[in-house]
Image: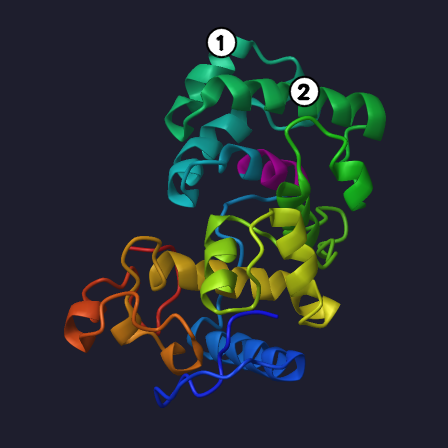
Amino acid sequence: MTRAAADVSDGKTAKPETHTALVRRARRIYRELGEVYPYAKAELDAENPFQLLVAVILSAQSTDVGVNKVTPALFRKYPTPADLAEADPEELETMIKTTGFFHNKAKSLLGMSKALVEDFDGRVPRKLEQMVTLPGVGRKTANVVLGNAIDPETGKPFGVPGITVDTHFGRLVRRFGWTDLEDPVKVEHAIGELFPRKDWTVLSHRLIYHGRRVCHAKKPACGACPIANLCPSRGIGEQDPVKAAALLKYKPGEGGLPL
């Protein structure tokens, strides 16, 4: 059972939360975050599944803003898996250096591209078990791509529901009292049990948006949080509404990347 969450809105002593109550509270948070971030989506710029896969690999220990600055030139030089598979490692490292950990990322990009060419006829596979066989691709990366990539031939999304357990998602689900687990795979399965499968991808977007903009790792803006009354961790961050508002990394009512 997760942390008690009853009576979080009025400050009374919390009681153990039943599973049914947890599901209801979790889904209410999901709905209310949808009202705050109706535009929530993947924030990496990509025009096709291959580009998105490359961008997600580069986003490890980096920001989406930083990745989006690097990828336009990268995609122009290496538009296909076959092109990237033949890239000069040192030249590739130079192009992606600002995203950090560029040695390992270049190795992953080269290996991933070669695997796409050799094993999947140059196409990004549509099954999780196939995606995770690619070098540098774990469940998180696979879920982002499968849930958000647009097929350039049909114009339709892959549309495979998946939960993306990045640092923001993991932090928030623990603060929300949805789970106490730390292992990303276990978190993915535990949270998946609280929501219909069809909601998994959008759930990930909404929590990641909120984590980047309001519920920060070191100093969450609790006093300006729209779902504070549903959060058992309310109070760990700045409580003063004015001071909390100054911590927000977005302008309420607007979309786009964090400020």
Q: Earlier in the sequence, mark 1 or mark 2?
A: 1
Where does the image place residue 237, in percent across and percent down from the top left?
Answer: 27, 65
What is the chief secondary structure element of the magenta stretch?
helix
Quadrant of the rendered image containing residue 10 = bottom left
Where does the image place residue 46, in percent across and percent down from the top left?
Answer: 56, 43
Q: Residue at x 57, y 51 (%)?
A: 165
- In this image, 19 relative to 243: left or right? right
| Front residue of this view, candidates 258 and 226 | 226
Residue 90, label in figure? 1
| Front residue of this view, candidates 14 and 158 | 14
Where does the image place residue 33, in percent across and percent down from the top left?
Answer: 47, 74
Report the span colored magenta: 49-55
- The residue type indicated by label 2 comes to Gly
Instruction: Please name the residue that numbered disc 2 is placed on.
Output: 111
Q: Residue at x 61, y 28 (%)?
A: 79
- Does residue 185 sit above or below 29 in this rendering? above
Q: Residue at x 49, y 85 (%)?
A: 6
- Does residue 116 sit above or below 244 in this rendering? above
Q: Is residue 68 magenta?
A: no
| Front residue of this view, candidates 66 and 134 | 134
- The residue type indicated by label 1 comes to Glu
Where does the image place residue 139, in percent across and percent down from the top left?
Answer: 68, 43
Residue 81, label in figure? none
Q: Residues within 10 Å of mark 1 (few under 14, many from 20)?
A: few
